[in-house]
Image (cartoon, coloured by chain):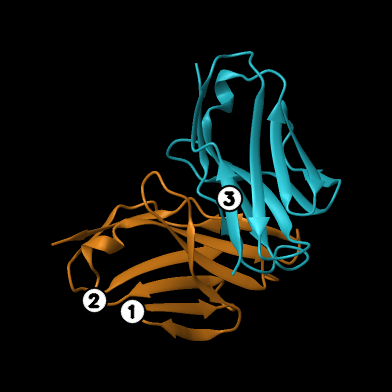
């Protein structure tokens, strides 16, 4: 089992829809969770951090964390073509003391 | 505000040649510094991290090395490049000890070994 798993996609949604990106992790003592956006050929850009169970909203983005289910998600409301990118989930493992990245989910927002 | 500079942006090197990639951070002191590699279509692989001057931890056995000669400077080197060293090299920094705080990435160096 991979430490951080994401569906590679591509996830295709129409413009204006809600995009839902999911991530599961294996380390039960994970403490910090991050979502990065990576445009093709560019470096990852931090878009959300979440540390406690529940929802955290920032503009059109909502991160959701459920530690009991070892699940973190990112919702993008009113998706725009400019949101088309690969989204990386990163989890800080309390056991290893390392930040583990998932392989990323490619999102395509179609006009 | 903090900024991270990484250069060069692209590099084409022949097999067996040396490598030196440099990264500097501005606007913060005592950052944690990291080198990652991202092979085409693959995830991020942590190569090295540093919590202070002269302190380097290596994550993956390879023909690469890293050095931190100054607080905000991180250098990735190789004496002889292999074809398998091709990839997108990313420098990153964070403010806290360990990795519980988010990483902030530089713009990356795309290395092609021919």
The answer to which of marks 1 and 2 sits earlier in the sequence is 1
Camera-nearest residue between A82 and B20:
B20
The residue identified by callout 1 is A60
The residue identified by callout 2 is A78
- Percent of width and height locating residue A94: 74, 67
Q: In the rendered view, does A5 fall on the left or right side of A29?
A: left
Camera-nearest residue between A2 and A62:
A62
* Occupied quadrant, residue A101: bottom right
Q: From this viewpoint, is residue A1 visible?
A: no
Q: In the rendered view, does A1 fall on the left or right side of A110?
A: right
Contact flag, marks 1 and 2 (Cβ < 8 Å): yes
Tell which chain the image draws in orange: A
- Percent of width and height locating residue A74: 41, 72
The residue depicted at 67 percent of the width and 73 percent of the height is: A31
From mark 1 to mark 2, how far is it between C-alphas? 7 Å
Q: From this viewpoint, is residue A75 visible?
A: yes
From mark 1 to mark 3, how far is it between C-alphas? 29 Å
Q: In the rendered view, does B62 fall on the left or right side of B104?
A: right
Q: Secondary structure at mark 1?
A: loop
The residue identified by callout 3 is B5
- Percent of width and height locating residue B16: 64, 13
Q: Chain of mark 3?
A: B
The residue depicted at 58 percent of the width and 14 percent of the height is: B15
Q: Indicate whether A27 appears above or below B113.
A: below
**Which shade of the palette goes to chain B?**
cyan
């Amino acid at each position: 089992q991979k430490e951080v798993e994401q569906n590679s996609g591509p996830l295709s949604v129409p413009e204006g829809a809600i995009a839902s990106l999911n991530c599961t992790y294996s380390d039960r003592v994970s403490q910090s969770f991050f979502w990065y956006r990576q445009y093709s050929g560019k470096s990852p850009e931090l878009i959300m951090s979440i540390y406690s169970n529940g929802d955290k909203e920032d503009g059109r983005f909502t991160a959701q964390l459920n530690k009991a289910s070892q699940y973190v998600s990112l919702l993008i409301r009113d998706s725009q073509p400019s949101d088309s990118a690969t989204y990386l989930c990163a989890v800080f493992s309390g056991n290893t003391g390392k930040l583990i990245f998932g392989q990323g989910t490619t999102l395509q927002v179609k006009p | 505000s903090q900024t991270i500079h990484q250069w060069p942006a692209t590099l084409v090197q022949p097999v067996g040649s040396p490598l030196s990639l440099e990264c500097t951070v501005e606007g913060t002191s005592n950052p944690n510094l990291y080198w990652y590699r991202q092979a085409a279509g693959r995830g991020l692989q942590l190569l090295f991290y540093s919590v202070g001057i002269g302190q380097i931890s290596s994550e993956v056995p390879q023909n690469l090395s890293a050095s931190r000669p100054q607080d905000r400077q991180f250098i990735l080197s190789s004496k002889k490049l292999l074809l398998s060293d091709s990839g997108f090299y990313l420098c990153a920094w964070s403010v806290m000890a360990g990795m519980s705080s988010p990483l902030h990435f530089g713009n990356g160096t795309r290395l092609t070994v021919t």
